[in-house]
Amino acid sequence: MATRNRTLLFRKHRDALKSVRAPSSSSLPSTSSAGGMLALLEAIKKTLKWWVVHCSCECSKDLNLVTVGLPPAWVDVSEEISANVQRARTKMVELAKAHAKALMPSFGDGKEEQRAIESLTYEITDLIKRSEKRLQRLSAGGPSEDSNVRKNVQRSLATDLQNLSVELRKKQSTYLKRLRQQKEGPDGVDLEINMNGSKSTYEDDDLDNMIFNEHQMAKLKKTEAFTVEREKEIQQVVESVNELAQIMKDLSVLVIDQGTIVDRIDYNIQNVATTVEDGLKQLQKAERNQKKGGMVMCATVLLIMCLVMLVLLILKEIIL
Amino acid sequence: MVLTSSARDYVNRMLQDISGMKVLILDSQTVSIVSVVYSQSELLQKEVFLVELVDSITKSKELMSHLKAVYFLRPTTENIQHLRRQLAAPRFGEYHLFFSNILKDTQIHILADSDEHEAVQQVQEFYADFVAVDPYHFTLHIPSSYIYMLPAVVDPSTLQRFCDRVVDGVAAVFLALKRRPVIRYQRTSDIAKRIAHETNKLMYQEESGLFDFRRTEVSPLLLVLDRRDDPVTPLLNQWTYQAMVHELIGIQDNKVDLKSIDKFSKDQEEVVLSSEQDSFFKANMYENFGDIGMNIKRLVDEFQQVSKSNQNIQTIEDMAKFVDNYPEYRKMHGNVSKHVTLVTEMSKIVQQRKLMTVSQTEQELACNGGQGAAFEAVTNLLNDDSISDVDRLRLVMLYALRYEKDSPVQLMQLFNKLASRSAKYKSGLVQFLLKQAGVDKRTGDLFGNRDLMNIARNMARGLKGVENVYTQHQPLLFQTMESIVKGRLRDVDYPFVGNHFQQGRPQEVIIFIVGGTTYEESRCVALQNASNPGIRFILGGSSVLNSKRFIRDLEEAQRVARSNTSIV
């Protein structure tokens, strides 16, 4: 793929032309008066140009006189959201590690790991929810170029957030599945023993019955505790799944479908052109309405009445 | 993947080294160039948050110095003027200028002069000056390309602009591929000769340093052909998917505009048909209409199964799975409805215009069949009132091209009948076509009746019978490509430029058809490339034709020729 860099040639010309322009202003006193006048005019033109450039921008942004040259305020919001996305990504890596650790067979109760997983999941969901709320704030009204930039920034951040939430939910569902498989293992064995236990109650003595019943009760209690705990875990995961589903629904409106007409650059340029034109038409209509509006009518009527009164006054003076 | 990947690489390189929020400014030509290879979502990933046209951006006065401007323009005088004005009052923080072709020194002077605020950080030439509609097919979108049909004396400045644009486009393709070719052109065409010589001058004399690439064993070949050597292919009705959509509805930059056909919902008004992004289209773009119908039915059945399973949501797990698969489901839904809409619309048009009968006669005219039978068939269709004007015109044109010398009386009869039936088409259009592309003007053996080999081949084909009556036509390009593969392209018909010479067979061939290419020809090239990987063909043209556009070019050329009395 061939390319050619013309920057050096360009810079050479630019510097050469700059040096041609600069001496004209510095050679002020040495030349004749006509030449001096010319150079003075050049200098004045240059400063005027500089003022025009800077004044025009100040006039257009009458509220942000100080922030000329600085990025507008919404850029901070977008940067905050992308920082959140970064943080959420690192936390996802931690969460994956915690999932793996919790799934490993261990002697302990596993409560700390559960708590770690819960807190990580909660943090990530919270980050995503907060980013989503800030994202809504990015959109602006009015057909200006700035609003298009904001809309596009919004879209790209929405895509990032959606990918994050999809990843999180996939991780959660795989973890849940593996968890269920694991927990069913020991439970299955327990149930089998229970079955055998209940069969043997009918065959053995009453004494044996009582002992088996005690064992049976203990085992039942344990399985009950397991089931309750498992239900709680599943409930929590399901809750977070539902929350994320809600977020996904909101975000999917903002995200562009790849391969469709909306994903085409020329379609978006055409749309921009039409919205800007529409905006212009709306402004013109508003102007016309304002001109036709009641205020102008009232003002003209009052003026006419004043003139009439003045004329009457003069007539009164003349007659009397 | 050759052309599309080159263009994509150029755009990638433009954007990758510049950090921060960017605005991409294009002109009306580079918009097409970038849109066919790069999507809006990919631009957003590269932090390009605004895309504008260079002429509309001068109207706004908003200062956006937190954005860096990346300009990708063609180096024309209007663009340089726009840039001058914008550099004099810069709105963005930094300016990075990329041009799609070679800049003249004077243009660099002008830009340097106007850059008083020193906002420009780089000026580069990135040679993506062609619209890569398919991997082996590019076009240049030249608007009034009818000018090639007229002699140079009519409008020398427009013709010069046309030639310059073609030379620029072809040079850009070779620069993107980093090759310098051996050039051959069609003997009987003045415009092909002119373009071949001007390209030679550019590549070997004016900018020989730029084109001085590593020499391969066998140089690639650039073959410049004239559309008028094969006027039959753009006139025929097409039955393979991509060609048919272009013929009946019209494809522009891989987009299909359905607004003129019928009222559709907002998201189906304009659809994208790109082989890069749509795997169903990639598998079916060269299939004929019957096979497409079956494949679409299969696609719809698959989709119905998926949506049925989606409706059967009973547990929370099912719900989670549904939300997981929702983006893919939506994409599939969009894709299926797009193809179903297209095929339905085309079926309607085929029904309305009775294209099955018309096309059968067209194919007979183009491929085989005796003169008497052809005359009868054409007369019957001319008498039929339900055939539209444009179809009647096409039939008479095809008959005239085939049996120009065979029976002048019958030809006259057809002309008169056409003139009496269709008031829309000015008389003499068919005669104008014959003057431009008649038997005397053509080099190639269009109907396979010039030399003995071709006659024998035709007879064998007629005896064997064809698979599908509607797709039996092979464009002349197919024979040209075969001769190149066998190394038997005749020097008499396709001479070399200057002192170029090539021994042996080239491995890369770029064929440029002045006047425009058709999707039938690009299908031919793609199939040839797939079946014969030893040699790679790339096809390009000044525009992509269908019968409407070709007839419009003829009408425009005829109008200009008539108004210009210096034509004999």
Image (cartoon, coloured by chain):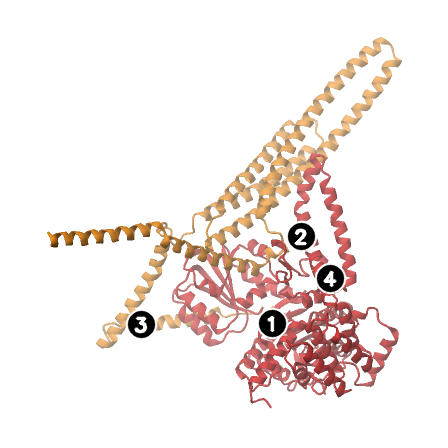
Chain colours: A orange, B red
Mark sitting on residue A23: 3
Contact (Cβ within 8 Å) of mark 1 with mark 3: no
How many angstroms separate mark 3 from mark 2 (CA)? 65 Å
Precedes in sequence: disc 2 or disc 4: 2
Q: Is residue A13 above or below residue B455?
A: above
Mark nearest the camera among 3 and 2 is 2
Number of residues whose C-alpha sits closer than 10 Å to that of mark 4, classed few (under 14), some (14–19) or many (20 or more) = some
Residue A78 location, x and y as percent?
A: 49, 47
Q: Is residue B205 visible?
A: yes
Precedes in sequence: disc 1 or disc 2: 1
Number of residues whose C-alpha sits closer than 10 Å to that of mark 2, classed few (under 14), some (14–19) or many (20 or more) = some
Please tell me if label 4 and label 1 are on a single chain: yes
How many angstroms separate mark 3 from mark 4 (CA)? 74 Å
How many angstroms separate mark 4 from mark 1 (CA)? 31 Å
The image quadrant where one finds the C terminus of chain B is: bottom right
Q: Which residue is mark 2?
A: B334
Q: Which residue is mark 4?
A: B347
Number of residues whose C-alpha sits closer than 10 Å to that of mark 1, classed few (under 14), some (14–19) or many (20 or more) = many
Observer-nearest of B333 and A197: B333
Q: Amino acid at mark 2?
A: Gly
Q: Which residue is mark 1?
A: B140
How many angstroms separate mark 1 from mark 2 (CA)? 30 Å
Q: Amino acid at mark 3?
A: Pro
Tag 3, which chain?
A
